[in-house]
């Protein structure tokens, strides 16, 4: 059987009221502990064997309770040895200050030793939780990298096939009062309902360029855009170049993607709210 384990740093679960500065305690407080999903600043979950999850949870509850008890008693000791407010008691306190100070330090030291023992017991009982989570994180990161490398190789292969083949598609849409010609590579991404929509498919890059020219002949202000995954694939294939630069490489044509009607840009700026972000802001500038 397995269980979901939610976790966070022990230093988050236990406040640092004792101010233990030794390296051993700091290292233990850097370990992970089990917490509930509803707790603040929680991470996870990680799936673990049920026996391990129960052991980590019990150790976490034990150390949190133990340190909480030590902190309460430390606060009481601190209150007990604070200088009294009344004058007579204050004089009595000053006469015995050295002895009271030693008593306070002895009790405080005993409580700190008790806290360190509780931290060590937690490390021995549940220190492997941190190792387990870190190992799972490494596995997931490696799997993510492998998955991304595989998808990248698939995108590059799709672009390479489209370079000399008929893998391009486009659809006319509406965007900000303009007709837009939206281009993509079918092997890289597909639009919902593409098979039954008005998309034109199975085109070469040069056929696509002729379609662009035909649309621009009908409407000089039609916008040209590439879908997101296709843009990413083109950039990977062409070593980080933009889709316009890649299109020039494929067809020899430099496309002007956004063409505005005369006066349109000025009208768009005039419609924007008259506000900025400070007296020197150029946010709403051209």
Image (spheres, helix red, strand yellow):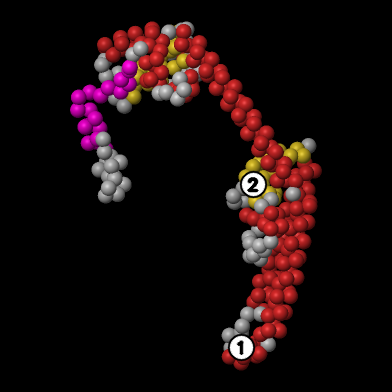
245 is within the stretch colored magenta: no
Is 148 located above or below residue 67 in the figure? Answer: above
Q: Which residue is mark 2?
A: 37
The CA distance from mark 2 to mark 1 is: 49 Å
> Residue 26 location, x and y as percent?
67, 57
Who's the residue at 66% across and 47% down the image? 7
The image position of residue 51, as x and y in percent, is: 80, 43
**In the rendered image, the vertical position of residue 228 relative to residue 187, given as above or below:** below
As for residue 260 lying within the magenta part, the answer is yes
Q: Which residue is mark 1?
A: 90
Where disc 1 sits, the SS reads: helix
Q: Is residue 119 left or right of residue 43?
A: right
Residue shown at the point (46%, 11%) measured from the top left:
163
At which x and y percent is residue 47? 71, 38
Graded by Cα atoms within 10 Å as few (under 14), some (14 to 19) or many (20 or more), the crowding at tag 2 reads some
Judged from this view, the residue extending furthest toward the bottom is: 88
Pick whichever, 238 or 174, lies toward us.
238
Task: Relative to 44, say whether 174 is above or below.
Answer: above
Give the magenta part as a residue range.
254-272
């Amino acid at each position: 059987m397995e269980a979901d384990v939610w976790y966070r740093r022990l230093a988050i679960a236990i406040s640092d009221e004792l101010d233990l500065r030794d390296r051993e305690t700091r290292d233990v407080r850097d370990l992970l502990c089990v917490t509930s999903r509803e707790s603040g600043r929680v991470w996870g979950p990680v799936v673990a064997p049920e026996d391990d999850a129960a052991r980590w949870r019990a150790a976490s509850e034990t150390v949190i309770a133990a340190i909480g008890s030590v902190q309460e008693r430390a606060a009481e000791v601190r209150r007990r040895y604070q200088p009294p407010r009344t004058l007579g008691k204050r004089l009595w306190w000053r006469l015995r200050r050295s002895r009271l100070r030693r008593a306070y330090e002895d009790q405080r030291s005993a409580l700190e030793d008790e806290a360190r023992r509780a931290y060590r017991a937690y490390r021995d009982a549940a220190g492997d939780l941190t190792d387990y989570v870190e190992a799972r994180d490494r596995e997931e990161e490696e799997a993510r990298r492998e998955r991304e490398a595989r998808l990248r190789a698939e995108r590059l292969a799709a672009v390479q096939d489209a370079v000399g083949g008929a893998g391009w598609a486009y659809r006319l849409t509406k965007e900000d009062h303009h007709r837009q010609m939206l281009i993509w590579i079918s092997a890289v991404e597909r639009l919902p309902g593409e098979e039954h929509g008005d998309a034109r498919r199975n085109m070469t890059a040069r056929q696509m360029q002729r379609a662009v020219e035909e649309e621009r002949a009908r409407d000089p202000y039609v916008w040209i855009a590439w879908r997101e995954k296709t843009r990413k694939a083109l950039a990977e294939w062409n070593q980080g170049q933009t889709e316009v630069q890649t299109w020039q490489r494929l067809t020899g044509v430099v496309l002007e993607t956004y063409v505005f009607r005369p006066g349109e840009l000025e009208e768009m700026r005039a419609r924007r709210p008259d506000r900025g972000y400070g007296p020197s802001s150029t946010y709403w500038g051209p």
